[in-house]
Image (spheres, rainbow, N blue to C red):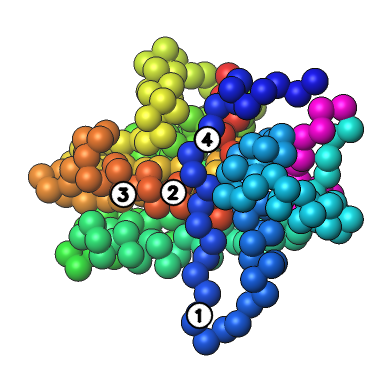
Amino acid sequence: MPPSSSTIRKPAAAPKPLPVERSQRGIQSVEVGGQLLLALAHHGRPMALKDLAREAGMAPAKAHPYLVSFGKLGLIAQDEASGRYGLGPLALQLGLISLQQFDPVRLATPLLRELAQTLGHTVAIAVWGNRGATIVRIEEAASAVHVNMRHGTVMALRGTASGMLFAAYLPRAQVLKALADEHAAELRERGHAVPARVKSSVDASFEAELASIRAHRLSRVIDAAVPGISAMSAPVFDESGAIVLSLTVIGPTAVLDTRLDGVVAQALRRCAKEISAQLGAREPTTRSS
């Protein structure tokens, strides 16, 4: 017997449907029934009829015929044991096709410009490439920051906001390999012999930094890579909870708000959360342990 409505915590109100141009006429019954699908998507798990109807703003008797039709189409499925309704196989297929059409960098680029204009600081996108965290988009602010960063620049895992962010969320084995590669490159640059097998590790201090990044969903460096320049970075996740890119704000230390609850931090988190939502993101997996 399914639990009563008193044992079910009511989630936040479901998001409103996207606005439709006034000149376009729709089918009202489809829009009404669509509120049930929106409620299920927002809730994230199967629901009892009365709870689902309440979330969609209609009586159970009105909701039931829509659910029957959606069930025939495969948009909704009812669990035989509990009687609860969840999204069906067609809804899953549509979701996967939609995700395949979304390129994270393409989605983030327009928001990158908006973020740079709003904050008045340079903003960059980095993705994980075969050499590490790699800058793929830069939106310069009106007063450009003079740092050695351009498209294709690879950011170190230590001492850069983008690099540390990826180090916090990527699988530990991947992080250790990247750290070993960085160390080997440093040895070559100094003219030292590179061992056949370069060892790497994460010390307690760096481990604490990574844990803090995961706790705040934000990384920051102050006067680290370049004196007088600071940066903050926020993660964007995909539907599996994996990090797909970083959004990084760079600016002069004297004027960049580097507080973890400051204006820049809040704007970064909002922007990253919006892009993640478009990618169907869920809570990130703890990958570095």
Residue 130, magenta (yes or no)? no
Q: Earlier in the sequence, mark 2 or mark 4?
A: 4
Q: Vertically, is 121 above or below 255?
A: below
C-alpha span from label 2 to label 4 = 22 Å
What span is in magenta?
Answer: 81-93
Residue 284 figure quarter:
top right
State the image coordinates of residue 137 (x, y, percent, origin top left). Answer: 43, 62
C-alpha span from label 3 to label 4 = 25 Å
C-alpha span from label 3 to label 2 = 9 Å
Residue at the far top: name it.
Answer: 204
User: If the image is split into quadrants, where does the N terminus sit?
Assistant: top right
C-alpha span from label 4 to label 1 = 29 Å
Q: Amino acid at mark 3?
A: Ala
Residue that carries the numbered disc 1 in the rendered image: 21
Q: Earlier in the sequence, mark 2 or mark 1?
A: 1
Q: Are marks 3 and 2 in contact (CB under 8 Å)?
A: no
Residue that carries the numbered disc 2 in the rendered image: 272
Residue that carries the numbered disc 3 in the rendered image: 267
